[in-house]
Amino acid sequence: MPDNQTINAILSSYGISGLAGGGGFSLWNLLWGTVFGIIGWMAFLRGRREANWRAMVIGIALMVYTFFVGNTWLVFIIGTALTAALYFWRE
């Protein structure tokens, strides 16, 4: 598996630089962002179908927050907290 420096060099050759808030590129950020993004998409669809604004708002938050958080642990912690809120704060 290539290291972050190699991945950033490849991405910069395509004109992409400074992913994840100006820091390096992390495959774990991409993985957790995808996992929580899928959970958020499903929550949004369920909230829209049932007219549940709480599920829709948490779903949007799950899909969007990873663009603003660069630390992998924070991505995991915030995603877990939002998913728990989605589970416990239901009607």
Image (cartoon, rainbow, N blue to C red):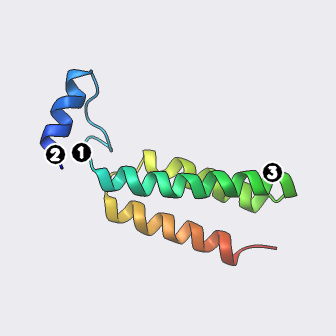
Please, what secondary structure does the residue beneath circle 2 have? loop
Q: Residues within 10 Å of mark 2 (few under 14, many from 20)?
A: few
Q: Amino acid at mark 2?
A: Pro
Residue appearing at x 71%, y 52% in the figure: 44
Left or right: 58, with 12 as reference point: right
Q: Is residue 51 visible?
A: no
Q: CA distance from mark 3 to mark 2?
A: 40 Å
Q: Amino acid at mark 1?
A: Gly
* Relative depth, front residue between 85 and 39: 39
Left or right: 39, with 3 as reference point: right
The reply to whether discs 1 and 2 touch (Cβ–Cβ < 8 Å) is no
The mark lying in front, picked from 3 and 1, is: 3
The reply to whether discs 3 and 1 touch (Cβ–Cβ < 8 Å) is no
- Residue 2: mark: 2
Please, what secondary structure does the residue beneath circle 3 have? helix
Q: Amino acid at mark 3?
A: Arg
> Where is residue 58 shown, x and y percent of the image?
65, 59
Q: Earlier in the sequence, mark 3 or mark 1?
A: 1
Q: Residues within 10 Å of mark 3 (few under 14, many from 20)?
A: some
Q: Quadrant of residue 32?
A: bottom left
Q: CA distance from mark 3 to mark 1?
A: 35 Å
> Where is residue 39 shown, x and y percent of the image?
59, 58
- The residue wearing badge 3 is 48
Q: Earlier in the sequence, mark 1 or mark 2?
A: 2
Q: Earlier in the sequence, mark 3 or mark 2?
A: 2
The reply to whether discs 3 and 2 touch (Cβ–Cβ < 8 Å) is no
- The residue wearing badge 1 is 23
Left or right: 37, with 88 as reference point: left
Q: CA distance from mark 1 to mark 2?
A: 17 Å
> Where is residue 10 shown, x and y percent of the image?
19, 30
Please, what secondary structure does the residue beneath circle 1 have? loop
Residue appearing at x 74%, y 51% in the figure: 45
